[in-house]
Image (cartoon, coloured by chain):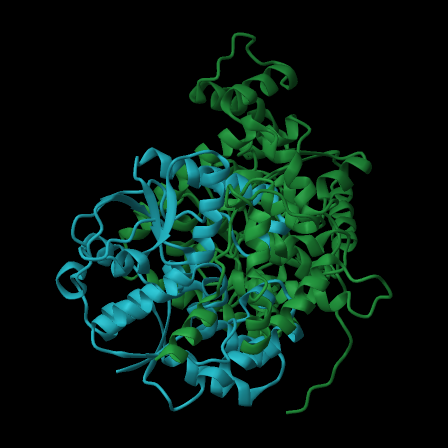
Chain colours: A green, B cyan
Amino acid sequence: MTHVFLGMPAAGQGNLHASEPFPQAAHHELGNTQLRANLRHATHTIRDKRLKVVGELPDWEELRDAGEAIKNFSMATLEQRLEEFERNFTAAGGTIHWARDAAEANEIVTALIREQQVAEVVKVKSMATQEIGLNEHLEAQGIDAYETDLAELIVQLGHDKPSHILVPAIHRNRTEVRDIFLREMPEVDPELTDDPPRLAEAARRHLRKKFLTAKVAISGANFALADTGTLGVVESEGNGRMCLTLPETLITVMGIEKVLPSWRDLEVFMQLLPRSSTGERMNPYSSLWTGVTPGDGPQNVHLILLDNGRTRALSDRVARSALNCIRCSACMNVCPVYERTGGHAYGSTYPGPIGAILSPLLTGIEAEENNSLPYASSLCGACYEACPVKINIPEILVHLRAEDVDSRRGQARLPSQMDLLMKGGSWALGSGKHLGLLEKALPLGQLAAGRRKKIKKLPGIAAGWTASRDIPAPPSKSFRDQWNAEKRSQ
Amino acid sequence: MRIALFATCIVDAMYPDTAHATVKILRRLGHEVIFPENQACCGQMHINSGYMPEALPVVENHISAFDTEGYDVAVAPSGSCVASVRHQHGFLADRLGRPDLKERAARVGARTYELSQLLTDVLGITDAAAELGSYFPQSITYHPSCHGMRSLKLEDRQLNLLKSVAGITVNELPEADQCCGFGGTFSIKNSEVSSAMLEDKVKNICSTNASLCAGGDASCLMHIGGGLSRSGAKPTTLHLANILASTKDEVFLP
């Protein structure tokens, strides 16, 4: 087979960008001690829960292998899977729309809402609509979109941004939530406490009217099953079920990578997803719909299939497995970097380790500050170990770092300190002779360390190291020298 | 057995004691140790920083130094460098379109072992006191470095060897599986996040009341030790090779 290069597919747009370099963004977030305490508590709780339920399954590793294999097959045959899905969904009375990017998807959704002559819609929590900035777009068009997931509601009422893909208000504690409700919910009980059941009750009362009056609902989807033309949403609160069944019109926005070959594949993913995301054996509500069922549920059913950079990511042979992500959030829950900085530091809708690879893959490494994201990891590997579909995130991070470095090679500019360090290092570490020569200077290091035998301050980029760490005085002779001296004396 | 020592660049330049300790342990078991002279570094710093063409001469040098008939197995007192030799060299060769190098990398990787891996899996050592004469009369805690734990899947190999040393007390480290924040150039590029991770590691080590923190990777230990030293905490760090090499006749004093 010959390959014909058709040009780089279009880059993703919308809320996929870091607007400032990660280290700077992290600096602001690290200063927020309340945030760090909230995040530490939340991530550690969910880590423990996940480990417990994953440990219950003797075939967990086999399930991960199966999840990876199914996803790889889906991605390798994406055209056929999508066309098969389109045929089956359309035959069941649904309507498919194809959107190249965020702007196209937003326009299609707006037109569909306008057709129903309403100015209010209810929403099921969805990453795809966050990614394309649908709420902001609708607001500009004079349409109010009400988030119905409790945490999304907290974020929306707090005029805030989500910081986690599963628990978007993870950066808030319950006292902060109470304060937001008191400030933003018109009919709230002024005696509201920060007791979780009372907070949930307040949200329920606030949302109930919306559920019962809304004519249009907007959702995302966790899965699309090609062989039956079925869409699925899994959730915990029941708000999704209300949105998916009560309104007359249901508009779903879904990334093209969510398609699975077969109904049977749910066996694997319904075990992997809840355990990896909320640390539960099964999520409370799983809703599946296949087009329109006459007289039952929404009668006007649409699906917008969104590319927005996915084809671009698929064309990257090393990194395409990032598209296998099922948005469980296990990687961010176990990530030591995410635990300290929270999700806002990543700028994009997708934070944490998966965001650090997915955002630059969708937009291209050179978009805004997204080239700083692949460096937001110590490469500890906790994400890879937790990923239910075995995305080798550390390897893709390294690959994207190389893309970043290579993207800057042609530019006319002075080499950075890192460039010089790496060039020098390439010579010094490229042979035993060179390294041996350099090691003759170890006594200079001893001199710098002085009587305390510690180096406390280094210049340039190395100052970052000595900001919080000493360097011990080096030995006077390297092992290499000592070994050779020993050999000579024999 | 003829064992090639891959000292690693950081141990060669900064911690020669640890390389000597590794040699001592292996000689004590009756093995011959050689030091391939042209060795320098595994190239991990370059690879992990995204400088692939610059990594190539470093990786090629390592492979030519170790792709020889002159030894049976190679050993390094580092999980991270062995993980790089085993997993990253092939990745780099693939990326730079060098199938010849990939083949040689696989040959070297297949017979390169991390120290506890060699001792446990190849040499069958289960009791350091009985079989190596290890004696170390101090209380320690133990940090399992990420690449050894996750990439090489060392599991309890290092800890089990440490626990079997005579005279030692091993205090459990809370949140031991959490990264210390080193991550090579991560500690420079994202210095503040790295420091925040280190701060928690230092706190956890101090909470054990151990007099030192042992581990299997000199780079992580230098990072943790640097944080302990800066915060004025009492504990220091020490490589497990130094502890295993310590005997009643020649107690290692950190």
Q: Residue furthest front?
A: A489
Whether residue A300 is visible, yes or no, is no
Residue A38 percent across, percent down from the top left: 50, 30
Determine the residue positioned at 36% across, 63% down. Answer: A63
Q: Is residue A167 left or right of residue A147?
A: left
Report which quarter residue B98 is drawn in. bottom right
Whether residue B160 is visible, yes or no, is yes
Tell me: residue A70, above or below residue B215: below
Determine the residue positioned at 60% across, 29% down. Answer: A32
Quadrant of the image for the N terminus of chain B? bottom left
Q: Is residue A175 left or right of residue A27?
A: left
Tell me: residue B224, above or below residue B199: below
Determine the residue positioned at 65% across, 31% down. Answer: A156
Tell me: residue A448, above or below residue B21: above
Quick one: A5 or A265, which is closer to the camera?
A: A5
Quick one: B245 or A215, which is closer to the camera?
A: B245
Residue B150 percent across, percent down from the top left: 39, 60
Q: Is residue A147 left or right of residue A490?
A: right
In this rendering, the count of numbered labels is: 0
